Amino acid sequence: MGETRRVMKALVLVASLSAVLLCPASFAAASSACLAVVNRAAQQAVERTPWIGQATAVGTPFALTPHVMRASVSLFGPQSAIFSVDVGVDAACNVLSTSVLLESNPWLNAK
């Protein structure tokens, strides 16, 4: 009985370590500091566009690939729109690149 228990503990340990070591980075939970960096970079990227208004990061960024996170930014003011911003980050959560995508444009749908 003691031998079986020791083998089971070893199997559980091996399974736990393999899940941690083999898990793709896109499934790893980002730290709250990194999420704040991504939101700030996304907001600044939208503010550099020619759209007029106040940019606000909305929600929690999520991982698209191991080194790209997507954040949502709303723009309020004379021109209102919703943007998705892909933020490229390295392992230390330094921003490498941003790509702004227009998700909605109320002026396009107005009649």
Image: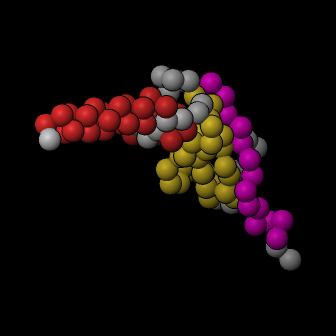
Relative horizontal placement of residue 60, taking residue 82 as reference (left or right): left
Is-magenta flag for residue 106?
yes
Q: Which residues are magenta?
A: 96-109
Q: The C terminus is located in which quarter?
A: bottom right
Q: Measured from the top left, where is residue 90 in percent x and y?
A: 56, 24
Q: The N terminus is located in which quarter?
A: top left
Q: Measured from the top left, where is residue 31 in percent x and y?
A: 40, 36
Is-magenta flag for residue 103?
yes
Relative horizontal placement of residue 61, taking residue 9 as reference (left or right): right
Q: Measured from the top left, where is residue 22 in percent x and y?
A: 49, 31
Main SS of residues in magenta? strand
Q: How is the image coloured?
A: secondary structure
Q: Name the residue at the bottom extreme.
A: 111
Q: Measured from the top left, where is residue 72 in percent x and y?
A: 60, 51
* Residue 88 seen in the current view: yes
Q: How many marks?
A: 0
Relative horizontal placement of residue 7, taking residue 14 as reference (left or right): left
Residue appearing at x 30%, y 38% in the figure: 12
Residue appearing at x 68%, y 60% in the figure: 80
Between 20 and 85, the one nearer to me in the picture: 20
Relative horizontal placement of residue 25, taking residue 19 as reference (left or right): right
Residue appearing at x 13%, y 37% in the figure: 2
Residue appearing at x 61%, y 55% in the figure: 74
* Residue 42 seen in the current view: no
Between 111 and 37, the one nearer to me in the picture: 37
Identify the image quadrant of residue 107: bottom right
Vertical position of residue 83 compared to residue 12: above or below: below
